């Protein structure tokens, strides 16, 4: 867990157990505390590759179904117009890639700048 995201683990341990420096404890204790974290803790969501809590997904699905049922009883629903947007789809659709560049150092920026000015590509 530490290798995956130490910051998330630190936040979860601090929030749940008020452990602010896990390095003061034996590794076996930290492991036991880590296993006891709730399923929607930051680190467990990261391990399971689940960015959103299951409860939130379930509530979004319920809300979508209710909105769809109510919409179907309206004039727009009868004609198939103005269908309500799905909250569940908004939560689960992949985020659009930004075309912005980020650099880790000034040297990396200067190299990219030189490549662009020379007519090279940014990728």
Image: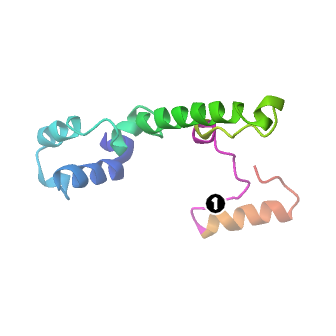
Please tell me which residue lies in front, 75 or 89: 75
Q: Secondary structure at mark 1?
A: loop
**Start and end of the magenta stretch?**
89-105
| Residue displayed at 20% across by 37% down | 36
The 10 Å Cα crowd at callout 1, few under 14, some 14 to 19, many 20 or more, is few
Residue under the image location 13 percent in, 54 percent down: 24
Residue 52 % position (x, y): 47, 40
Which one is in front, 53 or 77? 77
Which image quadrant for residue 92?
top right
- Residue at the image point whose x is 69% and y is 46% from the top: 96
Query: Taking 41 as reference, is 111 left or right?
Result: right
Quick one: 123 or 30, which is closer to the camera?
A: 30
Q: Looking at the picture, tell me which residue is in the foreground, 87 or 24.
A: 87
Magenta stretch holds residue 107: no
Residue 59 % position (x, y): 48, 36
Colouring method of the image = rainbow
- Disc 1 marks which residue? 102
Quadrant holding the N terminus: top left
Q: Residue 50 placed where, x, y %?
A: 46, 35
38 left or right of 78?
Answer: left
Asked if residue 102 is among those painted magenta in the image, a careful observer would answer: yes
Q: Residue at x 79, y 36 (%)?
A: 75
**Picture coordinates of residue 81 (x, y %)?**
82, 36
Res 21 → quadrant:
bottom left
């Amino acid at each position: 867990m530490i290798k995956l995201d130490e910051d998330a683990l630190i936040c979860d341990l601090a929030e749940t157990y008020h452990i602010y420096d896990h390095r003061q404890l034996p590794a076996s204790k930290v492991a036991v505390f880590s296993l006891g974290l709730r399923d929607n803790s930051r680190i467990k969501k990261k391990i399971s590759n689940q960015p959103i809590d299951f409860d939130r997904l379930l509530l979004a699905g319920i809300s979508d179904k209710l909105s769809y049922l109510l919409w179907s009883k309206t004039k727009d629903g009868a004609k198939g117009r103005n269908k309500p947007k799905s909250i569940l789809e908004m939560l689960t659709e992949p985020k659009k890639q930004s075309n912005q560049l980020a650099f880790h150092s000034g040297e990396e920026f200067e190299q990219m700048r030189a490549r662009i000015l020379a007519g090279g590509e940014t990728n």
